[in-house]
């Protein structure tokens, strides 16, 4: 669904007739250079022609091009890029730049894809197909205005494509224009009523509008069409259509409370072969959500001692002080029984400070309680926990992810020790023991898993980490001083992208308490400098979230005399207000 059509009309000038070879070799040319040839046969025929070493220059470039087409049918984008690159070296062409750019796009390397599409347009002639494909890359980067401009050109230049109308609609939806998006996608369905992808795209709009029954109906029809007829567009990534349709129908079923059908659809999404970035992201989300729905909901975590921790693993008191924080699973069951709508704004707040085997931190529990109160004051339903061991932390996170199924805005706040291992970020429970070993990551909470569980085109996600930025695998296991670091190291990993997966709608923002490679201070008072500033500004009415973080950054820099500079990474597509105007 992420990749749109690329027809072979661009290749008319590049078609290479069958070679004048011996009779036994007469069919190699047609097998290699026909788009309907099965992928393995096409690759094999091209291999044999290349092995003959009878062609050079433009004709050899054409053979490499067609072998790249065969690899593309199999979803092997590294081989597509290699063969297309060799074809370009021998004889650059618009079609080959376009093919290689599309392969880079499907790998999630949007900037390189755009460079190839630019080269295709430079050597010309202008083509609606190339404008369309460049629009896809802009859309994947979150550059929706540029994407819409390219889709406008694609629609103007032709040939007529339902995909251009569909993807322009997806871009409009991402910018909040649901009615404009619906009109464009309806036009795509009118142009090609047998195409399943626009139906899945329209289902996302129905979910954003709260019409779950229509969303289910559209994805059901998309699944039927995809099963009845395999995609005729050879550029559609293998398995992507069904993976997308099953994933979105599962999200609709889960939001409706039909967990049995949601489980079935998540499982079906995982059965497909994911070759492109979008399908892999959809399957990552399906894997997490299926796990959440498949397990028996555990009871609320008990106050189990985690010796020799200074304090017990426990649930933090809610506001007002002394009232127990309601367990999310119990709330979900109550909502199902009463028919009450799930909150559209939910938050997870965790503060871990009473570490048993590494240096304890005095302020995370205070920070978490202050943040939970601030979020409740502006209308969030908050799942709160402090000083959680691994079992309690895992249960709390998973309960929150279940509860977030219907939310439109989800905030995750964590204060405590956090680490980066092999480019992935982990949150540390209080019973963690930092030592090298294969089970190290299993003892912590993986931020990628949390993000995959929240990934949804109709949800805005705000993740706030007031954690250390050092690597526990480095030689030093603890450091002195009031700082949230375990040891000198590379710190938390910068997210490579926040929009390469299913989140092509509302977007995600991750805010870190400090810049990459630096230490987040725990502070001398009751709260860390970052959390103190955050709680002062998060409830300001009408303050856009990125402006709010700018104020927090300035305050933290001043309070720490420049020792700590908060940092953020965002794929948000518009203004987001946590406290309403």
Image: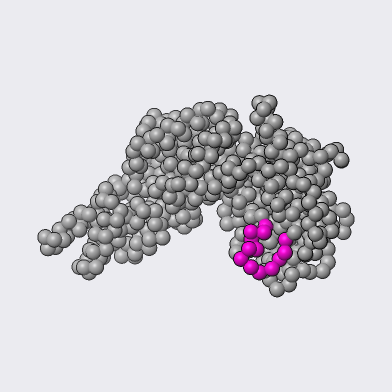
* 392, above or below 422, in the image: above
Instruction: Name the outermost residue toward the right.
Output: 525
Q: Residue at x 79, y 69 (%)?
A: 479
Horizontal side, residue 96 vs residue 375: left or right: left
Tell me which residue sits at (77%, 68%) in the image.
Answer: 478
Does residue 10 appear in this view? yes
Quarter of the figure that contains the N terminus: top left
Q: Quadrant of residue 390?
A: bottom right
Residue drawn at x 69%, y 68% is: 435
Residue 515 in the image: x percent, y percent? 70, 60
User: What quarter of the picture does the C terminus occupy?
Assistant: top right
Of 69 and 478, the residue lying toward us: 478
Q: Is residue 511 above or below residue 150?
A: below
Residue in the foreground of this view, choosing between 324 and 50 = 324
Q: Residue at x 34, y 47 (%)?
A: 234
Q: Is residue 52 left or right of residue 562?
A: left
Query: Do we see residue 113 in this rendering?
Result: no
Q: Is residue 425 magenta?
A: no
- Residue 187 vs 476, above or below: the answer is above
Q: Can residue 443 be found in the magenta stretch?
A: yes
Q: Which residues are magenta?
A: 432-444
456 is higher (above) or lower (below) than 464: above
């Amino acid at each position: 669904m992420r990749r749109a059509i690329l027809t072979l009309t661009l290749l008319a000038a590049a078609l290479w007739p069958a070679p004048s070879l011996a009779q036994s070799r007469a069919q190699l040319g047609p097998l290699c250079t026909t788009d309907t040839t099965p992928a393995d046969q096409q690759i094999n025929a091209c291999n044999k022609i290349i092995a003959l070493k009878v062609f050079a220059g433009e004709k050899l470039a054409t053979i490499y091009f067609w072998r790249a087409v065969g690899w593309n049918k199999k979803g092997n984008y590294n081989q597509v890029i290699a063969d297309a690159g060799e074809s370009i070296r021998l004889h650059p062409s618009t079609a080959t730049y376009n093919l290689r750019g599309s392969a880079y796009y499907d790998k999630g390397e949007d900037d390189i894809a755009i460079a190839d599409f630019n080269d295709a347009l430079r050597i010309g002639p202008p083509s609606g197909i190339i404008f369309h494909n460049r629009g896809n890359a802009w859309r994947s980067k979150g550059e929706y205005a540029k994407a819409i401009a390219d889709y406008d050109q694609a629609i103007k230049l032709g040939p007529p494509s339902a995909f251009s109308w569909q993807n322009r609609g997806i871009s409009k939806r991402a910018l909040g224009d649901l009615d404009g998006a619906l009109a464009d996608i309806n036009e795509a369905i009118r142009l090609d009523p047998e195409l399943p992808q626009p139906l899945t795209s329209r289902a996302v709009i129905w979910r954003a509008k709260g019409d779950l029954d229509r969303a289910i109906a559209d994805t059901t029809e998309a699944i039927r069409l995809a099963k009845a007829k395999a995609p005729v567009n050879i550029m559609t990534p293998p398995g992507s259509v069904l993976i997308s349709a099953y994933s979105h129908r599962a999200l609709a079923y889960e939001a409706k409370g039909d967990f049995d059908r949601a489980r079935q659809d998540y499982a079906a999404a995982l059965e497909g072969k994911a070759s492109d970035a979008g399908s892999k992201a959809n399957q990552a989300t399906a894997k997490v959500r299926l796990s959440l729905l498949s397990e028996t909901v555990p009871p609320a975590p008990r106050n189990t001692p985690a010796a020799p921790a200074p304090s017990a693993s426990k649930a933090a008191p809610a506001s007002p002080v002394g009232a127990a924080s309601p367990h999310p699973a119990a709330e979900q069951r109550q909502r199902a029984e009463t028919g009450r709508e799930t909150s559209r704004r939910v938050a997870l707040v965790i503060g871990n400070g009473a570490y048993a085997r590494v240096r304890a931190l005095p302020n995370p529990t205070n920070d978490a309680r202050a943040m939970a109160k601030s979020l409740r004051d502006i209308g969030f339903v908050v799942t709160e926990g402090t000083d959680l061991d691994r079992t309690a932390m895992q249960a709390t996170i998973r309960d929150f992810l279940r509860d977030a199924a219907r939310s439109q805005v989800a905030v995750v706040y964590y204060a405590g020790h956090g680490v980066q291992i092999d480019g992935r970020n982990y949150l540390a429970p209080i019973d963690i023991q930092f030592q090298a070993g294969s089970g190290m990551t299993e003892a912590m909470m993986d931020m990628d898993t949390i993000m995959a569980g929240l990934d949804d085109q109709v949800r805005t996600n705000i993740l706030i980490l007031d954690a250390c930025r050092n690597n526990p695998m480095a030689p030093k296991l603890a450091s002195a001083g009031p700082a949230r670091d375990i040891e000198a190291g590379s710190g938390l990993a910068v997210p490579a992208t926040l929009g390469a997966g299913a989140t092509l709608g509302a977007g995600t923002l991750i805010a870190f308490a400090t810049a990459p490679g630096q230490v987040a201070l725990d502070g001398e008072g009751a709260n860390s400098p970052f959390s103190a500033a955050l709680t002062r500004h998060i409830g300001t009415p009408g303050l856009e979230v990125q402006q709010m973080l700018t104020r927090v950054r300035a305050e933290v820099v001043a309070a720490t005399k420049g020792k700590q500079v908060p940092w953020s990474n965002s794929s948000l597509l518009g203004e987001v207000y946590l406290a309403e105007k």
